[in-house]
Image: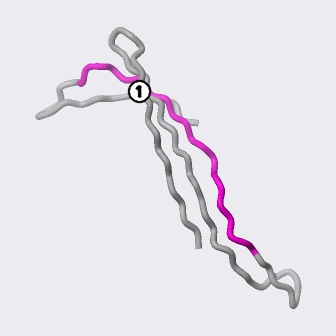
């Protein structure tokens, strides 16, 4: 059994003029409960795995967005453009 906690901090910064930069990270923390099982490659052998806790890959995304929202139908809309790694 495994559990994951995703920490998602967001940092916004003014670039001056009419633009903002928004940085967003996804930091996964994972916990895997230990287990014991049979090893299919070796007869009469078992596999013991202890409880494990750790961090997976961090995904960082940066967005550029205008400071003023655009009018859209009955409300306002804020768009952003980014590359994801």
Residue at position x 58%, y 36% from top?
85
Q: Is residue 83 magenta?
A: no
Q: Position of residue 1 (x, y in %)?
A: 59, 73
Q: Position of residue 35 (x, y in %)?
A: 69, 79
Classify 24 as above or below 50: above
- 69 displayed left or right of 55: left
Residue at the limit of the structure toward the left, as seen here: 74
Q: Position of residue 44 (x, y in %)?
A: 87, 90
Residue at position x 17%, y 26% from top?
71
Q: Is residue 55 magenta?
A: yes
Tell me the crowding category of disc 1: few under 14, some 14 to 19, or many 20 or more residues within 10 angstroms, Cα based. some
Give, as a single range, the part of the protein colored magenta.
Answer: 49-69
Tally of numbered tags: 1
- 77 displayed left or right of 74: right
- Which image quadrant is residue 75 in? top left
Residue at the limit of the structure toward the top, as seen here: 17
Q: Nearer the viewer, residue 32 or 75?
A: 32
Residue at position x 75%, y 74% from top?
49
- 73 displayed left or right of 29: left
Prevailing secondary structure of the magenta residues: strand
Q: Position of residue 22 (x, y in %)?
A: 43, 28
Check disc 1 and report its element: helix, strand or loop. Answer: strand
Residue at position x 42%, y 14% from top?
15
Q: Which residue is mark 1?
A: 12
- Which image quadrant is residue 78 in? top left
Classify 52 as above or below 47: above
């Amino acid at each position: 059994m495994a559990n994951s906690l995703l920490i998602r901090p967001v940092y916004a910064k003014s670039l001056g003029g009419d633009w903002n930069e928004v940085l967003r990270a996804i930091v996964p923390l994972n916990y895997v409960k230990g287990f014991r099982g049979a090893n299919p490659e070796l007869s009469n052998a078992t596999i013991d795995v202890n409880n494990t806790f750790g961090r997976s890959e961090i995904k960082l995304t940066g967005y550029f967005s205008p400071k003023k929202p655009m009018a859209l139908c009955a409300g306002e809309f804020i768009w952003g453009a980014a590359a994801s790694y």
